[in-house]
Amino acid sequence: MDFPFDMPSNYSSKYGMKPDGNFRLGSSIELSFTTEQPESLSMAAKPESIETNQRLIVDGNKLISTIHNLLYELESRGEHTVETINSERSQKNGLIEKLNLLRRKYEALEKENESLRMINRVLTEEEQSNRKNRVQGRETPQGSAISKLEREKQQLLVENSRLKQDILKLQEDDDKSRDKADQFLRSVKNNLDNERDSNRASTFNHTGTSSNISGTTLTTL
């Protein structure tokens, strides 16, 4: 089985990697490390303990297995994150629909309340007119209906008061729903930030662990 990737023949860098002989699965990999002195470092402060050239032999199978495991874990975490985002987005859409429904109910109650205010105004004007006629000692043809209108007015006042209470309750429910939606969105953002930080830390830890495990099999030349 051929190695899953090819290395260019002229590959060269500060930390290079080149195949040893026929580069196939199961073969060892020779890693060459070179160190360079920074220009800002004076010649007198040049460290003597660092070798200019170092080479390590790494087991190709273990290196490939480690890379595949890391890629698989990153892919699995990515799929889990996508599922979480879709679920939370669905919950957010549900909250938005509830808010829209409450808003429509509130608008309908406002229209009904406005109609009741208009009726109440008309009844008040009629009542004032009837009172003037009674003060002047004149009986109107509507005298028999005055008590009925007054009762209807009282009923409308009670209904108007009830509608105001319903509107206040809807406003409170709307505020609570908005607060829940804001808390939910903040929770989604925090979860995504924590997941991203966790992925970075996990990748770093896996890389360090893989290096420690591989270090037990490395041979310094």
Image: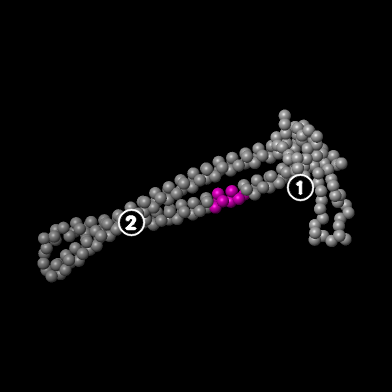
Q: Report whether 220 appears left or right of 86.
A: right
User: Which label was assigned to residue 13?
Assistant: 1
Q: Amino acid under label 2? A: Glu
Q: Report whether 178 appears left or right of 153.
A: right
Say what secondary structure mark 1 lies in: loop
Q: What stretch is highlighted in magenta?
A: 186-194
Q: In this view, does 157 lie above or below 194?
A: below
Can residue 162 be spotted in the picture? no
Q: Amino acid under label 1? A: Ser
Mark 2–mark 1 CB contact (< 8 Å)? no
In the picture as drawn, the residue positioned furthest to the front comes out as 10
Task: Single out the mark in the foreground, 2 or 1.
Answer: 1
Residue occupied by mark 2: 110
Which residue corresponds to the image point at 46% horizontal and 46% vertical from the top-left? 93
Q: Which of marks 2 and 1 is nearer the N terminus?
A: 1
Q: Quadrant of the N terminus?
A: top right
Colour scheme of this structure image? one colour
Which residue corresponds to the image point at 75% horizontal and 40% vertical from the top-left? 9
Q: Report whether 201 appears left or right of 129.
A: right
Q: Where does residue 143 sit, x and y in percent of width and height?
A: 14, 61
* Rendering quarter of residue 112: bottom left
Q: Quadrant of the C terminus?
A: top right
Q: Where does residue 61 sit, x and y in percent of width and height?
A: 75, 34
Query: Magenta residues: mostly which secondary structure?
Result: helix
Query: Residue 190 in magenta?
Result: yes
Give the camera-side residue of 182 and 131: 182
Which residue corresponds to the image point at 76% horizontal and 45% vertical from the top-left? 12
- Real-space CA distance between mark 2 and mark 1, rounded to the nearest whole angstrom: 74 Å
Give the camera-side residue of 217 and 193: 217
In the picture as drawn, the residue positioned furthest to the bottom comes out as 136
Q: Where does residue 204 sit, x and y in percent of width and height?
A: 71, 46
